[in-house]
Image: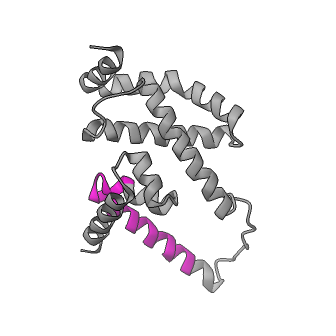
Amino acid sequence: MDGKQNELDDFRKNPNGVSAGIYNKCRPKFIGWGKENTRTSAQDLADIFQNAVIIMILNLESGRLTELVGTLCTYLFGIGKNLIQAFRRKQGRIGLPGDEAFPITKETDPGAEEQIIAQQTDAQLWAKVDALGEPCRSLLALTYREGLNSQEIADVLGYASPEVVRQLRKRCLDKLRK
């Protein structure tokens, strides 16, 4: 049995310990690589790496990742690179948070109450999405929070094709509507 398979076996035996070890070992390397090779801030790279770890854990726990070509760290880098590309594309479509000027509203403005209601409705919706469990939670978050398209989600989550992602998203949205 090679070292790559040993990493997977070790994860199955001690997921928290292996995840923490991989996180601590690979995070500085990923952030260093990202700062050197992309125009992405260290904070954004840290967030992207965190998302990559979550995706890796979900893929391991769901059984989608059964064998490695490289190490778990290499696998994380691959997921992270895909997330960076998606992040960079999303940045091109919309401005960064804080770039836009938000109008200051007073509590008496009619728009302030509507904004609060919209925020509460949004929070309730995401609570319902969370209640759906996996894989719906990840798929809908990558679609609507991260702005990834079906092909990008298929790459990140390891699905065979974007069509599989579209079918699964439709089922998840149908569950959410009920």
The residue at the point 45 percent across, 69 percent down is 122
The magenta-colored residue range is 114-138
Residue 101 pos. (x, y %): 75, 68
Find the residue positioned furthest to the bottom. Answer: 110
The residue at the point 61 percent across, 39 percent down is 45
Instruction: Report the magenta stretch's main SS.
Output: helix
- Asked whether 167 falls inside the magenta stretch, the response is no
Residue 70 pos. (x, y %): 42, 24
Residue 102 pos. (x, y %): 72, 69
Would residue 151 appear left or right of 109 to someone viewing this image? left
Name the foreground residue: 83 vs 110. 83
Name the foreground residue: 105 vs 66. 66
Residue 158 pos. (x, y %): 37, 45
Would residue 80 appear left or right of 90 to someone viewing this image? left
Could you say which quadrant of the image residue 91 lies in? bottom right
The residue at the point 44 percent across, 24 percent down is 22
The residue at the point 33 percent across, 41 percent down is 58
Name the foreground residue: 59 vs 21. 59
Would residue 55 appear left or right of 104 to someone viewing this image? left
Position of the N terminus, as image quadrant, is top left
Colour pattern of the rendering? one colour
Residue 157 against residue 109 in the figure, above or below: above
Q: How many marks?
A: 0
Could you say which quadrant of the image residue 41 lies in? top right
Residue 40 against residue 116 in the figure, above or below: above
